[in-house]
Image (spheres, rainbow, N blue to C red):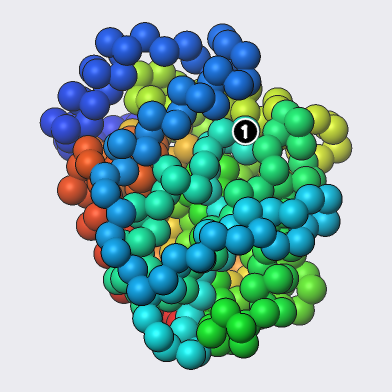
Amino acid sequence: MTNPHQSEVSLAPEIIAFLAAGAQAGLPQVWEAPIDVIRRNTYARVKNSGPAEPVHEIINRFIPGKTADLPVRIYRPTENPNAPAIVFFHGGGWVLGTLDIVDSSLTRLANQSGATIISVFYQKAPEHPFPIPFDDCYETLSWVLSNAESLCIDPTKVGVMGDSAGGNLASAVALKARDNGIKLAFQVLIYPCNERNFETQSYLDYATGYLLTTQAMKWFWEQYVVNEADNTNPYAAPMHAKTFKEVAPAIIITAQYDPLLSDSEKYADLLRADGVPVVYKQYDGMIHGFFATMAITHVAAESIDFMAQEIKKLA
């Protein structure tokens, strides 16, 4: 049988160089060092994202969550008193990640889309496992909708977005919004991890050698979902929703050489099967995490501009 992920397109040259430099650095894998060390090591990723673009206004503040006050960074690209809005959840396996790593990507996205972006620093596993990060993200959406007027946004043009674990959180928040009768304008899912199944084709094909590894994903899931029953809870593993009818239209972005590629392919199929409009775009030659690497590859900016154009169509 032909492997569906085999392609004539090889890794982009700049990605090959990036991976070689990472291998030479010899940093420990996520399961090989204390959490605080692993988190410190990820701060270096900010330099991969390149300089942030100037935007009309950036506001850093705290908002109330269920169990803690949450830091948010708000990007306002215009004076528009009724702008569309994106509630953004960053990646990092529910354990890692900062607002700064996606800062450059989000300033560009705000400028290109005309949308105000609210990026939240949700609480992290293993100290705060599911459902706490998910609750934080849903509470952020609720706060945005409740404060639409002071945020100068149109509450009918609000969507959710996230990369990797943030894509999982955006998928789950979109499901809960649907369940609670809230109509979102869109969901943007950048290589989301939506099921705890490590036997998919891409988990097998790209298990090692492409930055994110299958073993790392197993470790991340172990930190996030600690109760076995939650493996099939759709707010933890969105693939397990009983129905996807009436969830927000989806824009799904993937990388060719990514252990999570099959998750995105399957999720897109499930959404389409229940009548949800899906725009799906795979970036060949790319690896997991490319969204936040504008200093490494021109494809990062191209993907952001593509997402911005698609968001404009929906909001």
Counting other residues with Cα less than 10 Å from the Cα at mark 1, is it few (<14), some (14-19), or many (20 or more)? many
Residue 260 in view (yes/no): yes
Q: Position of residue 13 (x, y in %)?
A: 14, 31
Residue beneath label 1, please? Answer: 95
Q: Which residue is found at the position 20% from the left and 25% from the top?
A: 16
1 with respect to 13 (left or right): right
| Residue at the left extreme of this rendering | 13
Quadrant of residue 65 within the rendered picture = bottom right
| Residue at the bottom extreme of this rendering | 81
Q: Which residue is found at the position 42% from the left and 88% from the top?
A: 80
Quadrant of residue 197 within the rendered picture = top right
Give the camera-side residue of 101 and 213: 101
Q: Is residue 161 above or below residue 13?
A: below
Q: Position of residue 55 (x, y in %)?
A: 33, 68
Residue 275 in view (yes/no): no
Q: Position of residue 113 (x, y in %)?
A: 35, 74
Total marks placed: 1
Quadrant location of the N terminus in the rendered image = top left
Q: Which residue is found at the position 74% from the left and 54% from the top?
A: 69
177 with respect to 160 (left or right): right
Find numbered disc 1 in the image and state the secondary structure of the residue it sits on: loop
Q: Position of residue 212 (x, y in %)?
A: 44, 27
Quadrant of residue 303 within the rendered picture = bottom left
